[in-house]
Structure formats: structure tokens, C-alpha cells
Image (cartoon, rainbow, N blue to C red):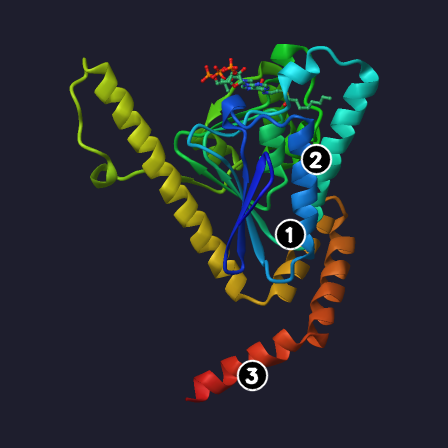
Amino acid sequence: MSNMKYIQLESQGEVAILRINRPEALNAMNIDVVSELSQTVDKIAADEGIKVIIITGAGEKSFCAGADISYMVDIDPIAAEKYASSAQSVLNKIERMEKPVIGAINGYALGGGCELAMVCDIRIASSNARLGQPEVTIGIPPGWGGTQRLMRLVGPAKAKELVFTGRMIPAEEAFRLGLVNSVISLTPDELPPEVAADDKDKQKERNNQIAKLLNNKLMNECIAMAKQISKNSFNAVKVSKMLVNRGMDADLDTGLRLEIYGWSLCFAHEDRKKMMSDFLNKSKK
Ligand code: CO8
């Protein structure tokens, strides 16, 4: 585990867990968070021992509440351009990284937080997560990719609705829209025992317990998925990621041609020969 002030990095074998750690501001990304995130992403990208990354937020309440409003309140357009550019470049870096990235959305993913979630390859949300682009409620449009990536994920009409209203949507609605891949919830037998409805302290304690259990379950599901991915050929996974990303904005013929090149290049990699031979030998046993 290595720690900066605002980014925690923990590894579990070939899986790295990156946590934005500024819970006192619901993990909102100030300039230092953006800079530490950028350095950590570079470090992970260069580490051959890491095959899959999980991005999440510290604590149980928030994945990331977006850009730092206390910083933005007084800045001029020059500083705003710099802030948006540096954040966009780190988000682009995450999206274009060869390694697959899973977003574990453990609470609020708002504004820049939703934009961070959208550059992850796969998003898994806890049932108490809330996603949205509330920027227009504070006088700006989304600026870290929200107007572009949201429409690619949910279509332009829904993207416009979410951006124009600034409405926060619950995890289940995000799932129905295709904004998250799945939602993790607790089954009745996993819930802590009920407490008296009029005992506010006990209710609060129970709610905290539920949030912790939910967070653990979310992380366990994300780690299990990351481990499943890491067992496969890293080369084939990385080429697949590149093909989907590059194909997204290309015409079908170009995407299909790119697929042929990506596919055939994998025949030069030792994984392909070994894994195909292992399969054939196993079936002979
Ligand atoms: N920035 C700074 N501080 C924040 C942020 C934020 N985005 N979000 C929460 N906080 C702080 C609060 O100020 C509060 O601090 P304190 O305890 O010192 O008062 C602490 O976190 C806890 O927050 P709340 O008390 O508000 O907690 P609640 O549970 O009552 O509410 C909410 C939780 C609903 C998440 C609420 O905090 C909220 O609405 N936060 C703002 C969310 C938001 O609007 N995010 C979008 C920001 S804009 C953006 O991301 C644009 C990106 C591109 C910009 C490009 C510009 C150059």
C-alpha cells in the first residue's frame, strides 16, 4: 500500500485499488487531488505487476462529489481553463490506459465524480449510490467530459435531461439507463436486525452498519470481477479495450478493419499459442 495525501493505493495481487481519500469534502477533487491522481495513474500504468484497477472513494458515503466548489467559487476563466484541462487530461489518461479499470461507485458520483466514473471501463454501483451532473445548479455546464461521455452512454436525449435538470439519480435508475453495469444490494438476511423506529441513535448506528456492509460487498464483487479479468490474457484484454474505445467513434467498416488488425496481431503474442495449446491438451486428458 502506498499513500499520498489524497490518494490511497493498495494492491491485492495483480489488482490495484485506488481510493480518492478526502472524505471530509465527500472526495471532491481539488487541484492537489487531480495532481496526485495523475501521478498515481502514471505509476499504475508503468507497473507491469498490475493488471486491473479498481477506482473508488474513501468512506461509505461518496465515490466523488466532483470538482471542488470552494476552489471554483473565486477563479477566473484562465484558471478555470487550466483546472478543466488538467482534470480532463487525467480522465483521458484513465480511459486510454491499457489496463482495464472498474469504478466501484460507493455513494455520490456527482459532476466531476460522475465524469470520473464514466472513464472507467466498467461501473458497479452500491444500491445507495447517487449519480448526476448537477453543474447547472451552480452556474456551469459539465466541464470534465460530461456533455460528451454521458450522451455516448445513455443517448443524447437522456443525457440532456440529466444535464439540464441537474437531477441526482439513484443507482437502480442509472442501471436502467446503462450508466452502470450492475447494482449491489444487501439481501434481507445480510441486513442488521431492525431497531425501534423512534430510537434515532440506534437507527443512525444501523444505517452506518448497512453502509459499511454494502461497501464491503461492493468491493468484494469488484475484486472478484477484477481477479476474473486478470486470469485472462492481459494482451487480449488490452487489445479488446483498445478496439472498443477506438471503434466507438469510428464508422463500422473502420472499426471492423481495426478489429482484424488487433486480432491478428495477437497471434504474435505468446499468450495465444500457450492458452490455445493448454486448452487442446486439457481436452485430450
Ligand atoms: N466541493 C467542495 N466541497 C464539497 C463538495 C464539492 N463538490 N461536495 C461536498 N462538499 C463538502 C461540503 O461543503 C461539506 O463540507 P463542510 O462539512 O465543511 O460544510 C462536506 O463536503 C459534506 O457535504 P454536505 O454537508 O453538503 O453533505 P450532505 O450529505 O448534506 O450532501 C451532497 C451531500 C448532496 C453530495 C452535497 O454535498 C452536494 O450537493 N455537493 C455538491 C455536489 C456537486 O454539485 N458537484 C458538482 C461540482 S461541479 C463539477 O464537478 C464540475 C466539473 C467540471 C468543472 C470544470 C471547471 C473548470
For label 2, the crowd category at 10 Å Cα-Cα, with few meaning under 14, some 14 to 19 and many 20 or more, is some
Q: Secondary structure at mark 1?
A: helix
**Residue nearer the viewer, 87 or 9:** 9
Mark sitting earlier along the chain (1/2): 2
Quadrant assignment for ligand 1: top right
Please give the name of the residue rendered at 68% of the width and 17% of the height, measured from the top-left corner. Answer: 71
Mark sitting earlier along the chain (3/2): 2
Mark sitting earlier along the chain (1/3): 1
Residue 86 rendering spot, x and y as whole percentages: 76, 32
CA separation in Å, label 1 and label 3: 31 Å
Q: Amino acid at mark 2?
A: Ser
> What is the number of the mark on residue 173?
none
**Mark 2 CB in 8 Å range of ligand 1?**
no
> What is the number of the mark on residue 35?
2
Residue 28 rendering spot, x and y as whole percentages: 58, 25
Residue hosting label 3: 277
Residue hosting label 1: 44
Q: Amino acid at mark 1?
A: Ile
Look at the image and tell me whether residue 14 can be seen. yes
CA separation in Å, label 3 and label 2: 45 Å
Please give the name of the residue rendered at 24% of the width and 15% of the height, measured from the top-left corner. Answer: 200
**Residue nearer the viewer, 173 or 37:** 37
When the figure is inspected, residue 120 is found, relative to residue 257, above or below; the finding is above
Look at the image and tell me whether residue 244 can be seen. no
**Residue nearer the viewer, 254 or 107:** 107
